[in-house]
C-alpha cells in the first residue's frame, strides 16, 4: 500500500498491483543505466500544498542532493523528475492533480507509465515527445515474461 496525506493531514492508503511494482523496478533499472549521476528512489514522499504525495519513482540530481541530503522523511520540494505508474487506485483526474502538485513543488518533468508500459513525458507547459533531461529514456517498457 502507498500512504499519502491530503491537504488536511488525513491519511490516504492506496493498494498497488503486482505489475505496478514490476514497472517501477524496470524504470529504476533504466534510470540506473542511463543516469550516470544523481540518485534514484522509489516511493519518494514529497511535501506539496495539498499534503504529502508519494512519487512511484524519482530522480534527483547531485545539486538537489547537496541542497536536501538523503535523510528526509519527506522532501520539502520535488526532485527534478517524478514518475507515476498507473495502478487500479489512481484515476486520470488524481494523476493530473498530483502532476500539478509536483510541478508546483519544483519538478522539472513528470512521467506517466500506463499498465501496458507506455511512458509519457511532461514538463510544466505540457506533453513532450521525449524527456528533455533523459532523451534516451524509452517511451515503452516491455516487462515481458522471463
Image (tube, rainbow, N blue to C red):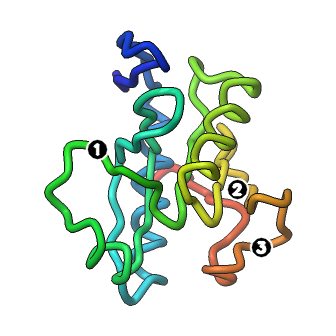
- Name the residue at 46% across, 72% down: 31
Q: Earlier in the sequence, mark 3 or mark 2?
A: 2
- Name the residue at 44% across, 27% down: 51
Mark 3 vs mark 1, CA separation in Å: 28 Å
**Badge 1: few (under 14), some or many (20 or more) residues near its Cα, within 10 Å?**
some
Task: Residue under label 1, please give it.
Answer: 74
* Residue closest to the eye, 91 or 12: 12
Task: Residue under label 3, please give it.
Answer: 130
Q: Secondary structure at mark 2?
A: strand
Q: Work out whether 146 lies above or below 39.
A: above
Which label belongs to residue 61? none
Which label belongs to residue 119? 2
Mark 3 vs mark 2, CA separation in Å: 9 Å
* Location of residue 96 (image quadrant): top right
Q: Outermost residue, left direction? A: 71
Q: Earlier in the sequence, mark 2 or mark 1?
A: 1
**Badge 3: few (under 14), some or many (20 or more) residues near its Cα, within 10 Å?**
some
* Residue closest to the eye, 146 or 4: 4
Asked if residue 142 lies left or right of residue 121, the reply is left
Q: Secondary structure at mark 3?
A: loop
Question: Could you say where residue 53 lies in the image, as x and y percent from the top left?
Answer: 45, 34
- Name the residue at 35% across, 13% down: 11
Q: Work out whether 55 lies above or below 6.
A: below
Asked if residue 102 lies left or right of residue 97, the reply is left
Mark 2 vs mark 1, CA separation in Å: 25 Å
Q: Are marks 2 and 1 in contact (CB under 8 Å)?
A: no
**Badge 2: few (under 14), some or many (20 or more) residues near its Cα, within 10 Å?**
many
Question: Could you say where residue 130 lies in the image, as x and y percent from the top left?
Answer: 77, 73
In which quadrant will I find the C terminus? bottom left
Q: Earlier in the sequence, mark 3 or mark 1?
A: 1
Question: Could you say where residue 38 lies in the image, as x and y percent from the top left?
Answer: 35, 79
Amino acid at each position: 500500500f502507498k500512504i499519502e496525506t491530503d491537504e488536511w493531514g488525513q491519511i490516504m492508503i492506496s493498494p498497488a498491483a503486482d505489475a505496478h511494482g514490476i514497472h517501477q523496478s524496470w524504470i529504476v533499472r533504466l534510470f540506473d543505466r542511463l543516469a550516470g549521476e544523481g540518485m534514484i528512489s522509489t516511493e519518494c514522499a514529497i511535501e506539496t500544498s495539498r499534503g504529502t504525495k508519494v512519487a512511484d519513482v524519482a530522480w534527483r540530481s547531485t545539486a538537489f542532493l547537496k541542497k536536501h541530503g538523503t535523510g528526509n522523511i519527506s522532501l520539502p520540494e520535488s526532485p527534478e523528475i517524478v514518475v507515476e505508474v498507473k495502478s487500479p487506485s489512481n484515476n486520470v483526474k488524481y494523476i493530473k492533480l498530483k502532476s500539478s502538485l509536483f510541478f508546483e513543488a519544483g519538478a522539472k518533468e513528470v512521467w506517466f507509465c500506463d499498465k501496458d508500459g507506455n511512458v509519457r513525458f511532461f514538463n510544466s507547459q505540457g506533453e513532450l515527445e521525449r524527456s528533455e533531461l533523459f532523451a534516451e529514456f524509452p517511451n515503452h517498457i516491455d516487462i515481458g515474461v522471463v
